[in-house]
Image: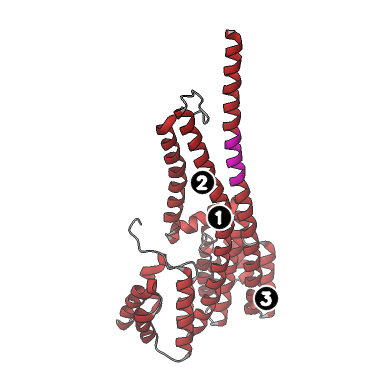
Amino acid sequence: MLFSPAKCPLPALVSWCRTLNHSLGAGLDPRRVFRQQAKSGPRPLRGMAAAVADRLDKGDSLEDAFEPHRDRFPPLFVELVAVGERSGRLQDAFRELEAYFETTYQVRTHFRSQMVYPAIQFVVAVLVIALLIFVLGMLGSTMDPTGTGLKGTRGAVTFLVVAFGVVGGVVYAFKMATDSIRWRARLEGYALIVPVWGGALKSFALHRFCIALRMTHEAGLRADQSLKYSFRATANAAFLRGEAHAVAVVKKGGELGDALAASGSPFPEEFRDAIEVAEESGQVSEVAERLSENYCEEGARRLKAAAEYTSYAIYGLVAIFIIICIFRIAGLYIGALDNAGKGL
């Protein structure tokens, strides 16, 4: 994992999907399209385009050609490409992916912009405390603002290394884990119990499920195949665990609603009811599309709330730490005055 290829940048992926959508719509053969992309496509994806073209020249399917690169793509990509290829609607798959990744990029950009000020506040707070440790040491003071025994230049440097090292280590570990589809799915599954964040991740998982369900249903795939791709599109372990149970139900002739209920996955009751009604009325594609839009909007709204709550949490933690340092310094100062008074 340490030396795994970098993930596809979303702007480049959006551009790639748009070009593939238009090129396939013009009747170009996929092998020719990927050869062109290897020469003039988005620079981060040229090597992958060449590798995919080589696999296609050998007679492999597009799904098999992308499989070795699965970890470089966001959720849903390989699943919808496979559905588009099997159903003869590859252009529709890339058009859907273009819209999905554009939305994902906008949501991610908004989230990062909201996290800028909390990050700046954290950095400033760490620098201020390190400066305080340094200055007190230079003045020869015995005061220990952090209560950790850190004093002077060495103490200030140690504080900086530990503070930034711990945060950097956590961020790095999280990034490395999310670079793997398996670990990312597990993390998102566990995170469903986290207040605010869990709701946002669940909404996006349902959003991806609905996109895949609509595409596979419109493509005329069997119910078991449709559910297989839809569950995998969630890229969330809490949902993926129920795939086998749901597929078993529809293979025995069960309805989609029954399959979702039997899966044990965290589908909301109103979601299962909507799918049941859609199946009874023969409007699975239409209902899945509406649900997809609703959950996308809900996920974006909840992610915004999660970012706000996270920023408040960072503000609070920094403020608490600073207050502790202030009270500690004040306590040491008052204690020194009391000792001086007793000495008199």
Magenta stretch, residue numbers: 314-323
User: Which amino acid lies under the numbered mark 3 shown in the image of this protein?
Assistant: Ala
Mark 3, other Cα within 10 Å: few <14 / some 14–19 / many ≥20: some
> Residue 123: which numbered mark, if any?
2
The residue pinned by badge 1 equals 116
User: Which amino acid lies under the numbered mark 1 shown in the image of this protein?
Assistant: Val
> Residue 293: which numbered mark, if any?
none
Q: Which is more N-terminal, label 1 or label 3?
A: 1
User: Which amino acid lies under the numbered mark 2 shown in the image of this protein?
Assistant: Val
Tell me residue 11's x, y (percent): 48, 71
Q: Which is more N-terminal, label 1 or label 2?
A: 1
Q: Nearer the viewer, residue 217 or 246?
A: 217
Q: Is residue 16 left or right of residue 334?
A: left
Separation (CA) of disc 2 from disc 1: 11 Å
Q: Which is more N-terminal, label 3 or label 2?
A: 2
Residue 204 against residue 315 in the figure, above or below: below
Query: Which residue is located at x 44 percent, y 48 percent?
Result: 168
Residue 146 against residue 250 in the figure, above or below: above
Q: Secondary structure at mark 2?
A: helix
Mark 2, other Cα within 10 Å: few <14 / some 14–19 / many ≥20: some
> Residue 278: which numbered mark, if any?
3
Nearest to viewer (mark 3 / mark 1):
1
Residue 212 against residue 119 in the figure, above or below: below
Q: Secondary structure at mark 3?
A: helix
Tell me residue 311's x, y (percent): 60, 50
